[in-house]
Image: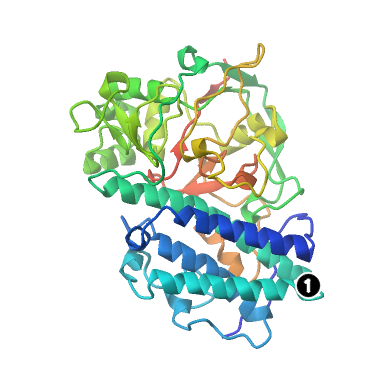
Amino acid sequence: MRLPPSTPTLPSSPQQSQPSMALRYAVVRAATEALARPLSAEDCCAQSMPDASPVKWHLAHTSWFFETFVLEAHESGFRAFDPAFRVLFNSYYHGVGRQHPRPQRGLITRPDLATVRAYRADVDARMQQLLSQPEVPGDVLALVELGLQHEQQHQELILTDVKHLLWCNPLWPAYQGTAAAVVADAMAAQDTAWRRLEGGLAQIGHDGEGFAFDNETPRHTVFLQPFEIANRPVTNAQYLAFVQAGGYREPAHWLAEGWDWRRAQGLEHPIYWRGDGECGQGGGPGGWSEFTLTGERPLHPAQPVVHLSYYEADAFARWAGARLPTEAEWEVAAAACAGPAGCVDHPADADVLDDGGRLHPRPAAPAVGADPFQPMGGEVWEWTQSSYAPYPGFAPAPGAVGEYNGKFMVNQYVLRGGSCATPPGHVRASYRNFFPATARWQFTGLRLARDAR
């Protein structure tokens, strides 16, 4: 079945030239390969839980996206690399056809990793040939850009899925390098500072400049009551105080579903933490350590707490006498901060491995001047209390690409800000990430908010 050409919604996205798109394609695809380079073939084929996927599957699926949505509709004389891949590496696009069940992706031992790499190379060569044609229609370039943005999302998933996989290994092996000591930061000893915002009418959503996913649109007006928001994400030291105060054993702090979930899972602290007496290295406050992509290391008090579920984040906020911000509050606060759109400024094509520190959240920078408020974004995804729902006037793109976001707008919560593993071009104030309330394996934390006093 050949798909008709379909153009995703790219609000006011500037049209890239064919040569620049060809270069951008090569850079993004190479970055994905770089993420897989430290891994063995065995690492690439294992699946640690139903929510995660093997690296081999990520490598294949991102190629499947270009083959299915770009080459199949726009390549002269198209022939699939392997017709069986249409089912094996389709994630959730029912408009394209059947999918192999997500919880069973680790059972796809054939094709082997070498064949998947050959598949990537074949798709890359054909894509470069397509992009080298004298004239490539704008709708094709738009699909290529969507595919690259999609691949960058999978780059973060590769890191989070690999981290969970290696954590499941009793040896707690490092993905890359060794755990280095983190220099203590001046922010470690400082209390949380609050910024007051007066509320009223405000605009949120993508402003029309640059790429945006359809769920960031349309830009619209919201009304906010006056509120206050913390100057930084909650730190390990703050969250450890909650743990040591018995926060995981006090139902008054938890939503009813969250308490039932916590009890069923037997949780006493965040995933990847290990306390004194749990056979770890220890060395952090109270003997606590945490597993990172560079191995186990002492829990650093000034770093943002990470890998929290919505339930854990909400329980901490209640214990702290605060709450999670709404996504509108978060975006308005981000826009009021320093930096572009209130977020950390990184080149759109930067590699998350360019800086080894990007494999784990860093402590907040010392305050500059009298204002303790830091630019928002780029260390942990921050849970909001907002359910993931369409903005007023939202309409998904026609065709199979319209399944990208809209059909997931139920039973999930919005996260804002971007993490240490997020490709920098995705760190913007309007970006809406989303996960179910139980998700813990992503780089997720929280920032406190409260009604204005």
Residue 101: percent from the left, percent from the top? 36, 69
Residue occupying the point 50% across, 74% down = 119
Q: Which residue position holds label 1?
A: 137
Q: On the picture, is 158 further left or further right than 75?
A: left
Residue occupying the point 37% across, 72% down = 112
Question: Is there any visible trace of residue 244 in the rendered image?
Answer: yes
Residue occupying the point 59% across, 33% down = 330
Residue sitting nearer the eye, 403 or 126: 126
Residue sitting nearer the eye, 28 or 373: 28
Q: Quadrant of residue 75?
A: bottom right
Q: Quadrant of residue 302?
A: top left
Say how many tags the image has.
1
Callout 1: few (<14), some (14-19), or many (20+) C-alpha neighbours within 10 Å? few
Residue lying furthest bottom: 77
- Label 1: element kind: loop
- Look at the image and tell me in which quarter the C terminus lies: top right
Up-down relation of residue 406 to residue 327 (above or below): below
Up-down relation of residue 129 to residue 167 (above or below): below
Callout 1, which amino acid?
Answer: Pro
Residue sitting nearer the eye, 373 or 295: 295
Question: Is there any visible trace of residue 411 in the rendered image?
Answer: no
